[in-house]
Image (cartoon, rainbow, N blue to C red):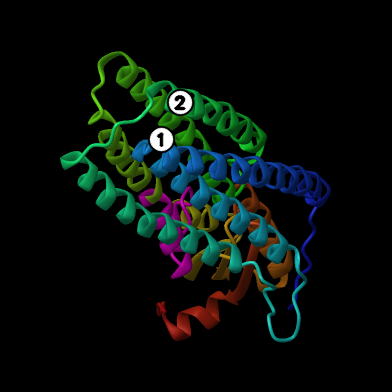
Amino acid sequence: MATQHTHPHLATDAVSLRRTSRALTIGIAINTAYAFIEFAMGLWQGSMGLVADAGHNLSDVAGLALALLAMKLVERQADNRYTFGYKKASVLISLVNAVILLFAVAGIIGESIHRLFAPDRIEGWSVAITAGVGVAVNFIAARLLDADKGRDLNIKGAYLHMMLDMAVSVGVVVSGIIISFTGWYIIDPIIGLIVAAAIIYSSWGLFHSSLRLAIDGVPEGIDPDRIVEAIAQSEGVVNVHHVHIWALSTTETALTAHIVVNDINRSDAIRNAVKEKLKGLGICHSTIETESESCFSGQGDDSD
């Protein structure tokens, strides 16, 4: 029997989507402008720290743009060919974003290692001032995304990258100041390697989470054992089996399950009670099939 879903949270979600969309758009604009200025300054001064940070900022711009694209695709309605809509695109985009970051880091590492053996002379104060602007830019972008970072894996990834960029820019500021006072030019490629290590560290978690969702693994924060236990303890439920949990998108989790009920005439009431309980556990899209005890005892408890 088909069941209807109610979505009282849609109005709140619409407000969140508009706020996040605006935040992403502003973040893309200010980070693009800053990345090109930082890259040009890095080439002019011969600073690998600035060039590496500019490259990271540009990759973050791509990440912000992909996150914005994911939001737009998620909003598209389902049709006869895509019955779930385009929600899964948000997972694939998150995975692509992580892969781009991991590939980009290879170039930074190579150039930084080269500069370790042949460091260039750079103007420390120019580097420090340029990176200081980056601290402000990334702080603004991160603050704009702060309210919604817990709602979406793509937004969380963008927020973490902005915070990481801010920390990296602080490091470049420090290296510029050190170079100004000491003339230790080797500090610059060292900062480039630190940037690369920070990118790998921040991107690996995003890559791992995105890959798991892409192959229909159980999303983070969802405990399958707890879900099964909650269903089994529901009034009227005798047995639960054939449980499957996966991500519809980076924000929505789905479940299908078979439950055996002690009174087949109360199937609708029992099923609706289970679905309400699942909503409290983070699963708002569930399909529950009910079976009678006599039917279940005849077929046994087979698993998929």
Tags 1 and 2 in contact by the CB under 8 Å rule? yes
**Residue lying farthest right?**
11
**Residue lying farthest top?**
181
Q: Which residues are magenta?
A: 204-225
Q: Which residue is mark 2?
A: 126
Q: Is residue 152 magenta?
A: no
Residue at image coords 37%, 18%: 177
Instruction: Please tell me which residue lies in front, 101 or 189.
Output: 189
Q: Is residue 215 magenta?
A: yes
Instruction: Please tell me which residue lies in front, 147 or 49.
Output: 49
Instruction: Please tell me which residue lies in front, 155 or 122.
Output: 122
Q: Which residue is mark 1?
A: 45
User: Would you call the spot at circle 2 few (<14 residues within 10 Å), some (14-19), or many (20 or more)?
Assistant: some
Q: Is residue 111 above or below residue 228?
A: above
Q: Position of residue 134 (x, y in %)?
A: 53, 31
Amino acid bearing label 1: Gln
Distance Cα–Cα, label 1 vs label 2: 8 Å
Secondary element type, mark 2: helix
Residue at image coords 60%, 42%: 31
Q: Is residue 234 above or below residue 20?
A: below
Answer whether residue 241 is visible to the viewer in this image.
Answer: no
Residue at image coords 55%, 53%: 63
Secondary element type, mark 1: helix
